[in-house]
Image (cartoon, rainbow, N blue to C red):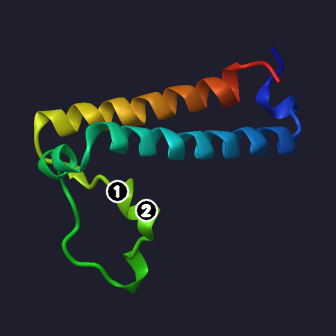
Amino acid sequence: MEAIDQVAPALVGARVIHVFIGAFFYIFAIAKLIGPVNKATWFKRRQKYSFFNKRGILGEYINFGYPVCWQGCVVFVVLYGVIFSFGYWYIFLKAY
């Protein structure tokens, strides 16, 4: 296995972009799977919006907020645990 500093920066950048795109689709699928009712029950969203933190249609759909019960904490840990684990494996451990 090559060290990460021996790999071309374009290849590393491409993998980072792959992880971002995959994370977006993964979060979208989890939001669809959980449904709007459970999402509203398990998470609290921001009440005040300004010009700088407004989101579009897709951004609002995948916006969970912060967890307010144990189910929300489990979803939070699973969401970010899977994204971080896959990203770390794909960028640092998988051979180029």
Q: Nearer the viewer, residue 95 or 65?
A: 65
Is residue 73 placed above or below 89 in the rendered structure? below
Give the SS element for disc 2.
helix
x and y, in percent, of residue 22 in the image: 58, 39
Q: Residue at x 37, y 57 (%)?
A: 61
Left/right of residue 83 with respect to residue 77 in the rendered view: right
List the residue tagged with mark 2: 59
Q: Position of residue 54 (x, y in %)?
A: 39, 76
Please tell me in which quadrant of the rendered image residue 56 appears. Answer: bottom left
Most distant residue in the bottom direction: 51
Q: Amino acid at mark 2?
A: Gly
Q: CA distance from mark 1 to mark 2?
A: 6 Å
Indicate the position of residue 77 as horizontal and vertical percent values: 31, 32
Q: Are marks 1 and 2 in contact (CB under 8 Å)?
A: yes
- The secondary structure type at the circle numbered 1 is loop
> Looking at the figure, which quarter contains the C terminus?
top right
What residue do we see at 29% from left, 52% from top? 64
The quarter in which the N terminus is drawn is: top right
- The residue indicated by pointer 1 is 63
Question: What x and y, as percent, mark residue 60?
Answer: 36, 63
Residue kind at label 1, given as amino acid type? Asn
